Image (cartoon, grey):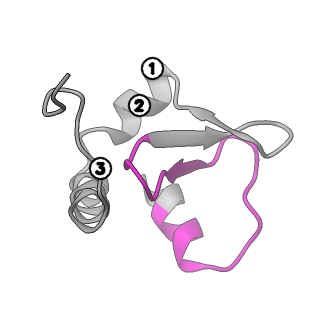
């Protein structure tokens, strides 16, 4: 987690394996070798999912977007 926060504070190009949050739904993502994005794998997800800083960022993103969880969507 320290790596994520220290890199977020600096302006630098992302590197493969770096993590990011989707600004629409707050999903935890990881950069691929070609700097595309993919959903974080189980290890990456477990490392970040319960971090208080990540949770706070996810809550902020979701509060400021029109995101709705699948559990809240009406079918």
Q: Given this view, does label 1 or label 3 mark the residue nearer the observer?
A: 3
- Whole-percent x and y of residue 58? 29, 54
- Whole-percent x and y of residue 72? 13, 33
User: In the displayed image of the protein, which residue is found farthest to the front?
Assistant: 75
Q: Are marks 2 and 1 in contact (CB under 8 Å)?
A: yes
Q: Residue 59 or 74: which is nearer the viewer?
A: 74
- Neighbor class of circle 2 (other Cα within 10 Å; few <14, some 14-19, many 20+) is some
Q: Does 10 appear in magenta?
A: yes
Q: Which residues fall within the magenta stretch?
A: 5-27
Question: Could you tell which of marks 1 and 3 lies nearer the N-terminus?
Answer: 1
Task: Give me the residue at 27% from left, 68% from top.
Answer: 64
Figure check: 19 above or below 2: above
Q: Given this view, does label 3 or label 2 mark the residue nearer the observer?
A: 3
Q: Residue 66 or 30: which is nearer the viewer?
A: 66
**Principal secondary structure, stretch drawn in magenta:** loop
Give the alpha-carbon distance from disc 2 to disc 1, as whole Å.
Answer: 5 Å
Q: Which quadrant of the structure image shows residue 48?
A: top left
Question: Could you tell which of marks 3 and 2 lies nearer the N-terminus?
Answer: 2
What residue is disc 2 on? 45
Give the alpha-carbon distance from disc 3 to disc 2, as whole Å.
Answer: 20 Å
Q: Does 14 appear in magenta?
A: yes
Left or right: 12, with 33 as reference point: left
What residue is disc 3 on? 67
Q: Secondary structure at mark 1?
A: helix
What residue is disc 1 on? 42
Q: Secondary structure at mark 3?
A: loop
Task: Give me the residue at 22% from left, 36% from top.
Answer: 69
Left or right: 74, with 28 as reference point: left
Q: Residue 7 or 33: which is nearer the viewer?
A: 33
| Figure quadrant of the C terminus | top left
């Amino acid at each position: 987690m320290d790596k994520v926060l220290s890199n977020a504070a600096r302006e630098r190009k992302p590197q493969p394996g770096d993590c990011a949050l989707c600004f629409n739904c707050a999903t935890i993502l990881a950069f691929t070798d070609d700097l595309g994005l993919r959903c974080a794998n189980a290890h990456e997800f477990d490392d970040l999912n319960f971090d208080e800083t990540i949770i706070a960022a996810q809550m902020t993103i979701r509060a400021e977007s029109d995101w709705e969880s699948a559990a809240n969507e009406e079918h």
